[in-house]
Amino acid sequence: MNAQPNPLPDTDALWMPFTANRQFKAAPRMLVSASGMYYLAHDGSQILDGTAGLWCVNAGHCRPEIADAVARQARVLDYAPGFQMGHPLAFEAATRVAAIMPQGMDRIFFTGSGSESVDTALKIALAYHRARGEPQRHRFIGRERGYHGVGFGGISVGGIAANRKTFSANLMPGVDHLPHTLNIAEAAFSRGQPAWGAHLADELERIVALHDASNIAGVIVEPMAGSTGVLIPPRGYLERLQAICARHGLLLIFDEVITAFGRLGAPTASAFFGIAPDLITMAKGINNAAVPMGAVAVRRSIYDTVVNAAQPESIELFHGYTYSAHPLAAAAAIEALNVYEREGLFQRAASLAPAFEQAAHSLRDASHVRDVRNLGLVAGIEIEPVPGKPGARGYEVFLRCLARGVLVRYTADILAVSPPLIVTPAQIEQIFATIREALQASA
Ligand code: PLP
């Protein structure tokens, strides 16, 4: 990697997403290249990636196999329309993704992102009920603190107040929310799934009784919620949710944009928990984030119902994206899946998980720590806020870690760690030791 300092670009024109633009532009943090577990910053410093980018670079950065596949594809077939036309890699990528989904969930709809996957899944759920002759099933149940991307569908079923506030009058109608499952008083420092909280799934019965099952299309939750600060499902919670959905004919949608492709040490969180939902949304790790791509895995019976309800010569689902199964994204997905398989990265994540848990929980006695939560290769460290300044300490500790050469993520006063699955035990130690030092340095 080039260790020479790079000049900073003019930062004015770019409106940065989910960023305090003025704060950032006053002191830009710029990444210029990456390899394996490391980023290189514009000032020539090396940064250990404790977050796999944004939970997406599961095989580590700039994998030559994936880069070659994308470069090759760019010269062979740069783009092909996906509507009424096909290209072989789209079908091959679908077959490969289907092969690692739970049994029976082998119909794959490609999108360009997690947000698009969520909107796609919601639409498929509505189309399914309509095809079955129950079009009045139009309501969705999401969950507080859920993150389902930034489309109007996603923010409506999502449960993050800040993401909804500005758009409140325009949210999708007919949405209700389950309570979130985080309770630090009951479950602080749980290792893996908390023992407390399965009963929170029973709230779904109350909501179903309120709206009547005949009006509800489905329930969407992240099996493990990452974005709002690593919320681990209590033991038995997801099982209860699934049983209630099955009882009332509601489709269960797992938003696995973060958890699919090995994050928990299994191909999907569904496989990890042994629960098969009806739809799974994915993105992020699908092609190691080399080219934007998302997908929805659909139970075959749902696909058959929607497709067979239409005349053979008519379009069955009026939905799709210009970039659905983009050839470069599909090429990257096939090669990323090859890398995951060849290197056994999902199993690697599973085998590293106990040491990762141990290292995360070593922070229990570190300064300002209120809670440590973990599952697979994910940890959340909740810290005491600076009185009257929520989020200030999270930001400070994030900066202090960065100054010490480790990238972690912060959501208000919660730090999240989710390294690429190629992380070594020594790097795991380094990440958590750096967080300890950064916490100690915070007044
Ligand atoms: N769903 C979940 C669970 C996510 O974590 C994310 C992104 O972090 C999304 C959806 C949105 O994905 P994207 O940013 O690719 O639209």
Image (cartoon, rainbow, N blue to C red):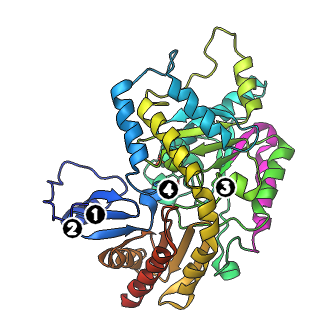
Residue type at mark 1?
Leu
Q: How far apart are marks 3 and 4 (CA)?
A: 15 Å
Lower sequence index among marks 3 and 4: 4
Image spot of residue 82 (x, y percent): 49, 22
* Chief SS of the magenta region: helix
Outermost residue to the top: 313
What's the mark number on residue 58? 4
Which label belongs to residue 44?
2
**10 Å crowding of disc 1: few (<14), some (14-19), many (20+):** many
Callout 3–callout 2 Cβ contact below 8 Å: no
Up-down: is 143 above or below 411? above
> N-terminal of the two: label 1 or label 4?
1
Vertical placement of 7 versus 14: above or below?
Answer: below
- Residue 406's place in the image compared with 308, above or below, is below
Is residue 423 magenta-colored? no
Residue 428's spot in the image, x, y percent?
49, 75
Q: Mark 3 points at which residue?
A: 269
Judging depth in this view, the residue of 422 and 438 nearest the camera is 422
Using residue 279 as the reference point, say whether residue 382 is left or right of it: left
Q: Is mark 4 on a helix, strand or loop?
A: loop
Task: Describe the element under mark 2 as helix, strand or loop.
Answer: loop
Question: Dot 1 corresponds to which residue?
Answer: 40
- What type is the residue that disc 2 sits on? Gly
Residue 58 appears in the rendering: yes
State the image coordinates of residue 163 (x, y, percent, origin top left).
Answer: 46, 54
Residue type, mark 3 in image: Ala
